[in-house]
Amino acid sequence: MKLRVLILAVFVIGLSGSMNGQLNKYKYIIVPKHFDAFKTPNKHQTSTIIKHLFTKNGFNAVYDDALPDDLTINRCLGLLADLEDNSALFSTKTAIVLKDCQSNEVFRSIEGKSKIKEYQKAYREALYDAFISFNGMNYAYTPETDEKQEVSEEPIVVSFRNDIKTVEEKPVEEVIIQEATPENQTYKSVKPKESSYTKAEKSQKLADGTLLYAQPIDNGYQLVDSTPKVVMKLTKTSVDDIFLVNHNGKSGMLTNQDGKWILEYADDAGKKSKELNIKF
């Protein structure tokens, strides 16, 4: 429990900074091969690890000595990654700071920590810890000059109730598959496969009447209400019962505290928290 409280506290501090920064308008993350915090290039393989972790989280990370042509022409297409080293005698502490082409701070990660004595392993653990801030961001480069197109995402066509399950199906049509000659044609059914979802058990609802159901997806769950509508998505972390949340375009954290699921996030009005009633 102490570990969960510590992780939650550090994460909330990160939220109070630039957690709400918009990263989608930046096409690249520029990773220096030589950070100012060290005397030699790629000290403790920090540059290698940071570039790898950005790439793993869906960002287009490039080294500062190998910039693409469009980034060379327009430096403002990218954010410069800086490693902030706050290590002490018996602990390694790092944070990742992203700055725009005018050296303005756009985003700051949580502070990753490690007490491993071997430097290379310690920096690796601390950096992986700091990159929790980037997990579940669903980053996708969106040029500001491009017209934004609204994407209608149909929810899963399964409606949950306390005592019944109904499945809505669209009319089934046959599809012609054209073969080598007009005379050879076959028909393939596109009838949806039968749903494998089981009836949800009864559970006590919140005061506002909201009851959410957790459906497994890659690396976590999606929460749907009874309509069903996808309310938010949860991304697993290395700690049980702690999830990163993408809720209405804002990042947050969901934790199980004394049997209750508590969502904590930050918006323009400051830090907020609310209890969710979830059926897993």
Image (cartoon, rainbow, N blue to C red):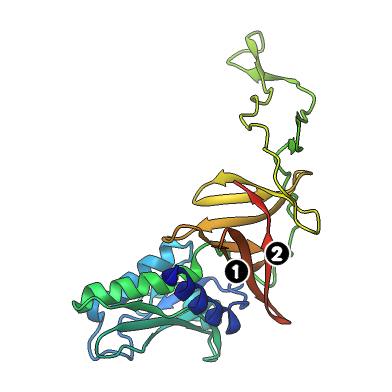
Q: Nearer the viewer, residue 43 or 12?
A: 12
Q: Quadrant of residue 18?
A: bottom right
Q: Quadrant of residue 3?
A: bottom left
Q: Secondary structure at mark 2?
A: loop
Counting other residues with Cα less than 10 Å from the Cα at mark 2, is it few (<14), some (14-19), or many (20 or more)? few
Q: Quadrant of the N terminus?
A: bottom left
Determine the residue positioned at 74% across, 65% down. Answer: 147
Q: Is residue 74 visible?
A: no
Q: Is residue 220 visible?
A: yes
Residue 189, horizontal then vertical, whole percent = 67, 18
Residue 69, horizontal then vertical, whole percent = 46, 73
Determine the residue positioned at 31% across, 88% down. Answer: 87
Viewer-nearest of labels 2 and 1?
A: 1
Q: Say above or below: 252 vs 174.
A: below
* Residue occupying the far top of the picture: 183
Label pair 2/1, CB-CB below 8 angstroms: no
Q: Is residue 172 left or right of residue 236?
A: right
Q: Secondary structure at mark 1?
A: strand
Say which amino acid is labelled 1: Gly
Q: Quadrant of residue 81?
A: bottom left
Q: Nearer the viewer, residue 11 or 17?
A: 11
Q: Distance between the Cα atoms at labels 2 and 1?
A: 10 Å
Say which amino acid is labelled 2: Asn
Q: Nearer the viewer, residue 255 or 137?
A: 255
What residue does disc 1 label? 252
What residue does disc 2 label? 248
Counting other residues with Cα less than 10 Å from the Cα at mark 1, is it few (<14), some (14-19), or many (20 or more)? many
